[in-house]
Image (spheres, rainbow, N blue to C red):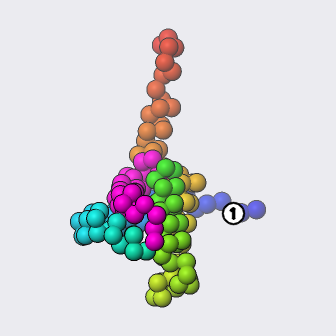
Amino acid sequence: MLPPRRHPALPDAGLLIGRLAVGVIFIAHGWQKLTGTGHAGVARSFGELGIPLPGLAAHFTTWVELLGGAALIAGVLVPIAGVLIALNMAGAFWYVHMDNGLFSRDGGYEYVLVLGATTLLFALVGAGRFSLDAVLRSRRAEAPERGSAPA
């Protein structure tokens, strides 16, 4: 049997810290794609890597990273953002890093593996109590049911 937690808010604080760190990373990467070479440059790069539908993939990747990172930071729609970002990292693994081994220094997949697994963790566990998802969920629970008469 596991010992009781020291404080019930610690797991939620951990989720918040993780969401903030990972969200900043994805916003930075999405912003770099958007303002660096732009969609055309990203699409060209994706085409050279053999990524199917490179134009569509460039748009998907840029906006999933930007908006998904913002969603992680705010803690809103985290299950959706987490799955979309994890899929994005699966594509990076498959098309770019898989054949280079584990280590990032060799162009390997350790970085995308950690980011993909972390965002999938957020998708499965949720954002925690320090999030907009939790605020919205508590407001829905407090709202009276439609069609019911006030007491």
The magenta stretch is 50-78
Report the residue marked by disc 1: 3
Which residue ends up furthest to the bottom in the rendered image? 106
Specify the principal SS of the magenta part.
helix
Asked if one can make out residue 128 in the rendered structure from this viewpoint, the answer is no
User: The N terminus appears in which quarter of the rendering?
Assistant: bottom right
| Residue at x-position 42% and y-position 65% | 22
Please state which amino acid type lies under the numbered disc 1: Pro
Q: Position of residue 7 (x, y in %)?
A: 55, 58
- On screen, residue 55 versus residue 10, left or right, reads left
| Residue at x-position 47% and y-position 44% | 134
- Secondary structure of residue under mark 1: loop
| Residue at x-position 48% and y-position 55% | 84
Whether 76 is among the magenta residues is yes
Q: Position of residue 69 (x, y in %)?
A: 38, 59
Q: Position of residue 55 (x, y in %)?
A: 36, 60
Q: Is residue 49 above or below residue 39?
A: below
Q: Residues within 10 Å of mark 1 (few under 14, many from 20)?
A: few
- On screen, residue 116 versus residue 4, left or right, reads left
Whether 2 is among the magenta residues is no
Q: Position of residue 59 (x, y in %)?
A: 35, 57
